[in-house]
């Protein structure tokens, strides 16, 4: 295989411009996907809670950041998974890596469409109730959901690191 070609049946064929652009788009989408996941979860959200007061403002900021991060994830996942088959020989993604990517999308979907709305409704309920007993119960539920969400997010970060490390 030469620098300007891809190996096809033992012979070197010129790499098409379209394929080079698609490969660049694939790599950019994978980078944006994993990089956005790491940046929002490991930098922006913790920084919001360290800097912003009151905590409810930090929570509002973090929930918006996670919402937009999930949009980036879904768009980038669509690009990466759509281009995977066409670029299979070039990107060297194993079946295991594809399953990891699909798992990341599934975890992001659970967070965005199940845990996120559930946690948002609990936040609203906590603001509406003045009873300390009710607020404590809601805060306990919120904390449990936040813990589950954090584990799912950490799994996405680890899976993303593995996929990026395995990609060539």
Image: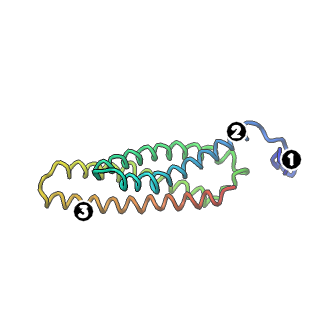
Q: Is residue 110 visible?
A: no
10 or 39: nearer the eye?
39
Mark 1: secondary structure: strand
Mark 2: secondary structure: helix
Q: Nearer the viewer, mark 1 or mark 2?
A: 2
Q: Position of residue 26 (x, y in %)?
A: 64, 45
Residue, disc 2: 21
Q: Is residue 134 visible?
A: yes
Residue, disc 3: 140
Residue found at the very far top of the displayed protein: 18
Q: Residue at the location (41% across, 46% down)?
A: 65
Q: Are the two marked residues, 1 and 2, in contact with CB atoms closer than 8 angstroms?
A: no
Residue 12, numbered circle = 1
In the shown orientation, is residue 14 left or right of residue 136? right
Circle 3: is it few (<14), some (14-19), or many (20+) Cα within 10 Å? few
Mark 3: secondary structure: helix
Q: How is the image coloured?
A: rainbow
Q: Position of residue 54 (x, y in %)?
A: 27, 51
Quadrant of the frame with the C terminus: bottom right
90 or 135: nearer the eye?
135
The span from disc 1 to disc 2 (Cα, nearest Å) is 19 Å
Q: Residue at the location (59% across, 61% down)?
A: 162
Residue 157, numbered circle = none
Earlier residue among tags 3 and 2: 2
Q: Residue at the location (75% across, 36% down)?
A: 17
């Amino acid at each position: 295989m030469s620098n300007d070609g891809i190996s096809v049946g033992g012979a070197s064929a010129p790499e098409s411009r379209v394929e080079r652009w698609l490969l660049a788009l694939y790599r950019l989408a994978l980078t944006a996907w994993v990089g956005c996941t790491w940046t929002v979860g490991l930098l922006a959200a913790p920084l919001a809670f360290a800097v912003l007061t009151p905590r409810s403002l930090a929570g509002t900021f973090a929930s918006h950041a996670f919402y937009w991060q999930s949009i980036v994830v879904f768009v980038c996942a669509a690009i990466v998974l759509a281009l995977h088959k066409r670029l299979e020989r070039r990107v060297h993604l194993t079946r295991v890596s594809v399953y990891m990517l699909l798992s990341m999308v599934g975890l992001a979907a659970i967070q965005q469409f199940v845990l996120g709305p559930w946690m948002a409704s609990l936040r609203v309920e906590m603001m509406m109730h003045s009873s300390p007993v009710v607020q404590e119960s809601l805060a306990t539920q919120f904390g449990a959901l936040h813990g589950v969400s954090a584990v799912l997010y950490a799994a996405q970060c680890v899976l993303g690191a593995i996929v990026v490390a395995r990609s060539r």
